[in-house]
Image (tube, helix red, strand yellow):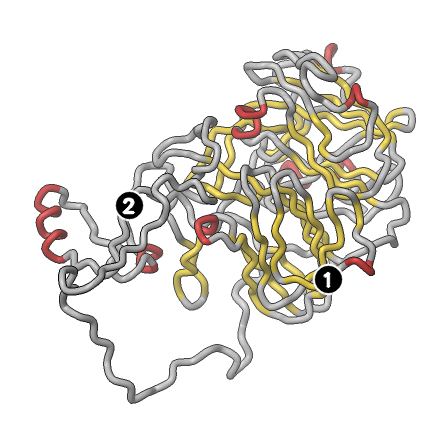
Amino acid sequence: MVSRRDFLKGASLAGVAATAATVSKVAMAALPEIISVSDADTQAPHMPDTGRPYNPVVTLNGWTLPWRMRNGVKEFHLVAEPVVRELAPGMKAHLWGYNGQSPGPTIEVVEGDRVRIYVTNRLPEHTSMHWHGQRLPNGMDGVTGLTQPGIKPGKTFAYEFVAQRAGTFMYHPHADEMTQMAMGMMGFWVTHPKNPATMAVDRDFVFLINAYDIDPGAYTPRINTMLNFNLWTFNSRVFPGISPMVVNQGDRVRIRVGNLSMTNHPIHIHGHEFMVTGTDGGWVPPSARWPEVTTDIAVGQMRALEFKADAPGDWAFHCHKSHHTMNAMGHDVPTMLGVEQRDLKQQLQGLLPDYMAMGQHGMADMAEMQMPLPDNTLPMMSGQGQFGGVEMGGMFTTVKIRKGIAKHDYRDPGHYQHPAGTVAWEVENDLPPVERPADTDAHGGVEVQVRKPGDHMQH
C-alpha cells in the first residue's frame, strides 16, 4: 500500500509537483491541493490509501489523480490549463489539458462513492466539465449554457454526485468543444465495483484515442480540422512514444479504450483473441460476449477488452486503419510506384541538393531514411525492433508478455528472445530472378491508374 505522502514523494521524482502558483493559499485553503505531472511516462498504479478498496488501473503514458477524503466525500481537483505534451521523443505539442498533461489524469472511484470534483480554469476562455456516460443530477452534467454557466478564467466550480454504476467513463469540456477538445482537453474515469472481486483482472490498462493536425515544424494543432488529421494518438502519444503494455504470462488482462477523436478506430491485437466485456452502458453479460481480434470503436464510445495473455512475445496492438499507424503524412503527394526517378532526381538535385527520390519501390525505406525534417517534426514512420525498422507510427504499440513479471512491475523488459526455430526464415529457392519491364507502354493498351480520393475525407 502506498501512502499519499509516499505517492507524492515518489511521483515528484518522475515529474509530479504540487503547485498553487497563481492562487493564494487563503483562496486555496478549502480546496484540495493542485497536483500536476510534467512528463509523459506511464506511472505505476495508484493504490487507494483512503476510501473503499479497489483494483487500480494503469493509464498508458499517464497517471491517476490522488484525492482527499472530507466528511465522507472523495474530493479531486482538476485544473484546466495550457500544457506542453511530448508526443514522442523529438516532438512536443502546445495543447490544453488538465494538471500539466493532455489527457488529464485518470479519476478512479468506487461504485456508491460520493465525489466532489473542483475544476479551476486557467485557460484564456470559459470552460466546463462534462462527465461522459455518468448518471448524475442534470445540473452536474456540464453543458455550458444548458445546465450551467461557463467557468470563467480564474474561477473554480465544484461538481458533486454519487458514482452510481461501475464502468468506464470519460470527462471532457462541453464549452467551445471544437477548440477545447481539438486542443487535447479530455480524461479517463473508472468507477470500480463495490466488491473488488467482481470482474477482477491481473492488469487493467486504460487510454483515450485522440488525434491532432499539426503542421510540420509547428507546435499548435489546427483546431478547425474535422477529418484530415496527421497525428493519430493513444493518450496524446504516437509510436514509438507509446509505452508497451507489460504483462506476465498467464495474466488476465483488460484494456479499456475511449474514443474522443473524429472517426472510428478498428483496434486490433496480434496473437490473442479477446472478448468485449464492457461498453458505454456497463458490463456485457457473459452470455452476450463473442471472441474478436479486432473491434471497432466509434466516436464517443468506450470499450473494455479482455483476454488471457497465454502466449509470450512482443505482440502488436494498433488501429487497423493503415493511415492511423503513420505520423505526419503529405496527403497530396502523388503515387510514385514504378516511376523511374533517376533522371528526375539528378535534375532536382541540381536545384535542391537535399532532394531525395522516394516511393518508386514502396514507402518502407522511409523508415530508415535520414530525411531532413523541420524542427519539432516526427518522421512518417519510425521505431526500431530487434530485426530492423518497425515502419509504424501513430496508433501503434505492443503487448509484451513474459514469464516472471512481478505483480506491479510495468517496466519494459526489452526485446522478446524467441526460442530457436520459432522465427520465420528465408528459404533458398531456384525461382527466376525478379524482372520488371523497363517501360510501360501507356499507348498500346489500357492503362489503369489507381488513385485515392483527392480530398482525403475517408478516414
Q: Looking at numbered disc 2 in the image, what kind of residue is underneath it?
A: Val
At x 37%, y 37%, the residue is: 376
Position of 355 relative to 96 (above/below): below
**Closest to the observer: 268 or 442?**
442
Residue topped by disc 2: 333
The answer to which image quadrant residue 377 occupies is: top left
The answer to which image quadrant residue 213 occupies is: top left
Task: Say whether residue 408 is visible.
Answer: no
**Whole-percent x, y for residue 33 in the image:** 73, 24
At x 74%, y 17%, the residue is: 147
Question: Mark 1 and 2 residues: CB-CB less than 8 Å, in contact?
Answer: no
Left or right? Give the position of 105 relative to 101: right
**Whole-percent x, y for residue 236 in the image:** 54, 39
The answer to which image quadrant residue 353 occupies is: top left
**Whole-percent x, y for residue 440 in the image:** 16, 64
Position of 30 relative to 454 (above/below): above
Going from N to C along the chain, the mark reached first, 1 or 2, is 1
**Closest to the observer: 306 or 143?**
143
Question: Considering the numbered disc 1 on the image, is that residue within a helix, a strand or a loop?
Answer: loop
Residue topped by disc 1: 290
Crowding at mark 2 (Cα within 10 Å: few <14, some 14-19, many 20+): few
